[in-house]
Image: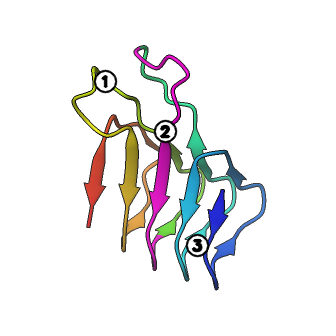
Amino acid sequence: MEVGEGTWIGSNVTIMEGACIGKIAGSSPGAVIAAIPQDLKFQGEYSNVFIGDNTTIREFVTVNRGTKDREKLPSEVIVSSRLIVTWRMTVLWVIIA
């Protein structure tokens, strides 16, 4: 787990193994970052979540780690320079830039 300089972590935020959070980012209360994916194809493989600089994860948002699906896609989730306000973000692979 890595957290960049100037990043604010709210109360009751859960940051799990595989998270890398950029500079001047923010996590509001109750957010969960890098949780184990809910994808049934997940078999315990190592995967990551990269939260880019200047990104805000709002209250109670969950950003799950990616899954490795038959070697076709990277097993990482990348979120950058955005405000994420949905309750749950379950993805196999996404780049938001």
Residue name at image x 28 percent, y 60 percent: 96
Callout in the foreground (2, 3): 2
The image position of residue 62, as x and y in percent, is: 54, 45
Hey, what amino acid is under mark 3? Gly
Please state the total of marks drawn on the protein image: 3
User: First in sequence: mark 1 or mark 2?
Assistant: 2
Horizontal side of residue 63 vs 68, given as left or right: right
Specify whether residue 7 is painted magenta: no
Q: Residue at x 54, y 80 (%)?
A: 23
Pointer 3 local density, CA inside 10 Å: few below 14, some 14–19, many at least 20 = many
How far from the left and from the top, in percent, is residue 17? 66, 45
Furthest residue to the left?
72
Mark on residue 47?
Answer: 2
94 to the left or right of 51: left
- Disc 3 designates what residue? 26
- Location of the N terminus by quadrant is bottom right
Q: Which mark is residue 12?
A: none
Residue segment shown in magenta? 41-55
CA separation, marks 2 and 3?
A: 22 Å
